[in-house]
Image (cartoon, rainbow, N blue to C red):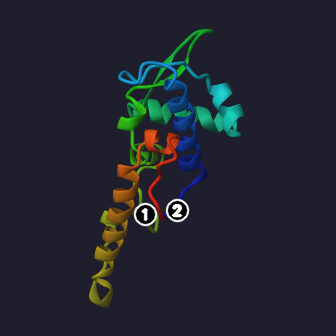
Amino acid sequence: MYISARADYAVRAMLAVADAASTGDERSGGGELVKAASLADSQDIPLSFLQGILLDLRRAGLLHSHRGTEGGYALTRPPAEISVGDVLRAAGGALTSVRGMPADRAGYHGIASGLRDVWLAVDGAIALVVDRTTLADLLADRAPAP
C-alpha cells in the first residue's frame, strides 16, 4: 500500500473536522463548522489541494458543507461511524494497487498465477486494519498496534 499525500491529507482533514465535531452533538456528528482555510492552516495542507480533497469527501458522503460567512465543513456522521478506510477510498479509490490498478484487476498466468491471490490477501489485510479504525479511535489515541 502506498499512502499518497492526498490520502494522508484527507485523513488529517477529517480528523480536524471530527475534533471540531466533538464540541457538538456526538449522535448527529454535529458541532462547529470548520472552514477550509482553517483546515489548511492547522494541518499545513496547501489550500488549493485541500479544496479538491474536501470536494471528494463531500461527494463520498463523509462531509457536508455550508456556504456563507458562517459556513464551513462538518461530518455527515459521528466520528465513531467513519473509518479510515472510508476516507482513504474517498480520497484515492482502491486501498491497494498493482501497477496502478486495483488489486482485484491484476491478472497473471503461468508460474505467476498465484500472485493475484497474494495481492488480494494484502488488500484484505489492509482493509481489515483501516476499516476497523475509526476517526473516534484516532482522536482517542486508540489506533491498532503495528
Other residues around mark 1 within 10 Å, as few (<14) / some (14–19) / many (≥20) = some
Tell me, yes or no, whether the two marked residues, 1 and 2, touch with CB atoms within 8 Å.
Answer: yes
Residue denoted by label 1:
97
Instruction: Identify which residue, 32 or 100, lies in the foreground.
Output: 32
Residue denoted by label 2:
2
Q: In this view, does 83 lie above or below 145?
A: above
User: Which quadrant would residue 70 be assigned to in this image?
Assistant: top right
Q: Where is residue 35 in the image (x, y as percent from the top left)?
A: 61, 22
Instruction: Identify which residue, 19 or 52, lies in the foreground.
Output: 19
Q: Is residue 47 visible?
A: no
**Dot 1 amino acid type:** Ser
Q: Is residue 128 above or below residue 92?
A: below
Residue depicted at 46% across the width and 61% down the height: 145
Mark identifier at residue 133? none
Instruction: Identify which residue, 19 or 65, lies in the foreground.
Output: 19
Instruction: Identify which residue, 114 or 139, lies in the foreground.
Output: 139
